[in-house]
């Protein structure tokens, strides 16, 4: 399914991105390109994984960074088979009347424009190869409003629509585009949400959050043909049947 293939993961320094890198490596990926704005986390992870991992410091909000990232991936591993759009931020958690305009814009640049930038950068290479898989980590916030999350809800809704547009335009060319809505995940971002205490998500008990390893396993499963019925759509890990298909629950 993934053996010998090259995967780019944005937001790879921790949480879902880091766990995805480990699980793709364990499954036999031939190349794992780790992308994050800071070098420390991805360099340590690359050292942990070994020579199949390449750490590239890059900002998804800058299209030139994403083009350079794809060039390095191809120069090192020869191709790109999977892109995982994972990079995202939850700040600024604030009601619209109080939100800092610059921070709000920056969140949209990372969560939405970043998905476009990475996808746009990798598409020419995937099309030359005859296909590839683009997976975007979505959220329930893409489909319903939450207090103090206008930046996050709006940007995730836009990213979900990008998945649908990509599928419409390029499925016939061999591009597999799928979104993944994991639910709430026990990561550092969830701790930031909890500290805000401002909406129902912030008040969830920690035991209700799923581990990032589950999300990583879902992303790996989505690279195979079993996920083809969901092309152009979004898979929800809140769905018990999906959890069973992936093997997360009996």
Image (cartoon, rainbow, N blue to C red):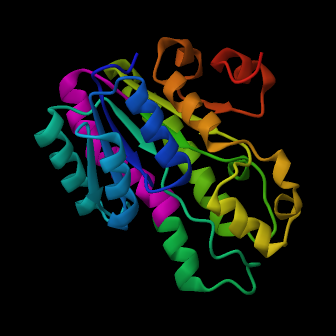
Where residue 223 sits in the image (x, y, percent)? 46, 23
Q: Quadrant of the N terminus?
A: top left
Instruction: Examine the residues drawn in magenta and state their main secondary structure.
Output: helix
Up the image or down, 77 lies above or below 149; here it is above
- The residue at the point 33 percent across, 27 percent down is 29
Q: Quadrant of residue 43?
A: bottom left
Where residue 77 sits in the image (x, y, percent)? 17, 34
- The residue at the point 58 percent across, 84 percent down is 101
- The residue at the point 42 percent across, 23 percent down is 27
Where residue 63 sits in the image (x, y, percent)? 29, 60
Is residue 223 visible in this depiction of the protein? yes
Up the image or down, 167 lies above or below 32; here it is above
Nearer the observer, 67 or 10: 10
Q: Is 224 a magenta residue? A: no
Nearer the observer, 49 or 143: 49
Is residue 61 visible in this depiction of the protein? no
- Residues drawn in magenta: 110-133
- The residue at the point 84 percent across, 48 percent down is 207
Up the image or down, 232 lies above or below 15; here it is above
Image position of 133 (left or right of 102): left
Q: Is 120 a magenta residue? A: yes
Image position of 114 (left or right of 57): right
Q: Quadrant of the C terminus?
A: top right
Q: How many marks?
A: 0
Nearer the observer, 241 or 127: 241
Where residue 64 sits in the image (x, y, percent)? 23, 62
Image position of 32 (left or right of 227): left
**View extreme (top): residue:** 225
**View extreme (left): residue:** 75
């Amino acid at each position: 399914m993934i053996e010998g293939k090259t995967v780019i993961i944005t937001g790879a320094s921790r949480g879902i991105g880091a766990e995805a890198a480990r699980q793709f490596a364990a499954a036999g990926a031939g190349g794992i390109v780790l992308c994050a704005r800071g070098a420390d986390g991805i360099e340590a992870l690359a050292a942990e994984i070994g020579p199949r991992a390449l750490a590239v410091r890059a900002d998804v909000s800058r299209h030139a960074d994403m083009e350079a990232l794809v060039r390095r991936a191809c120069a090192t591993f020869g191709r790109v088979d999977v892109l995982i759009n994972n990079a995202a931020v939850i700040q600024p958690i604030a009601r619209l009347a109080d939100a800092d305009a610059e921070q709000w814009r920056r969140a949209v640049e990372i969560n939405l424009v970043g998905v476009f930038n990475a996808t746009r950068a990798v598409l020419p290479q995937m099309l030359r190869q005859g296909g590839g898989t683009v997976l975007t980590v979505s959220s329930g916030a893409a489909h319903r409003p939450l207090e103090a999350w206008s930046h996050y809800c709006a940007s995730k809704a836009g990213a979900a629509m990008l998945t649908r547009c990509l599928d419409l335009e390029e499925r016939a060319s061999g591009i597999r585009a799928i979104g993944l809505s994991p639910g709430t995940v026990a990561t550092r971002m969830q701790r930031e949400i909890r500290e805000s205490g401002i909406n129902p998500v912030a008040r969830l008990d920690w035991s209700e959050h799923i581990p990032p390893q589950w999300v990583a396993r879902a992303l790996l499963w989505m690279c195979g043909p079993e996920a083809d019925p969901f092309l152009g759509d979004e898979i929800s890990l809140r769905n018990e049947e999906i959890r069973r298909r992936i093997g997360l629950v009996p």
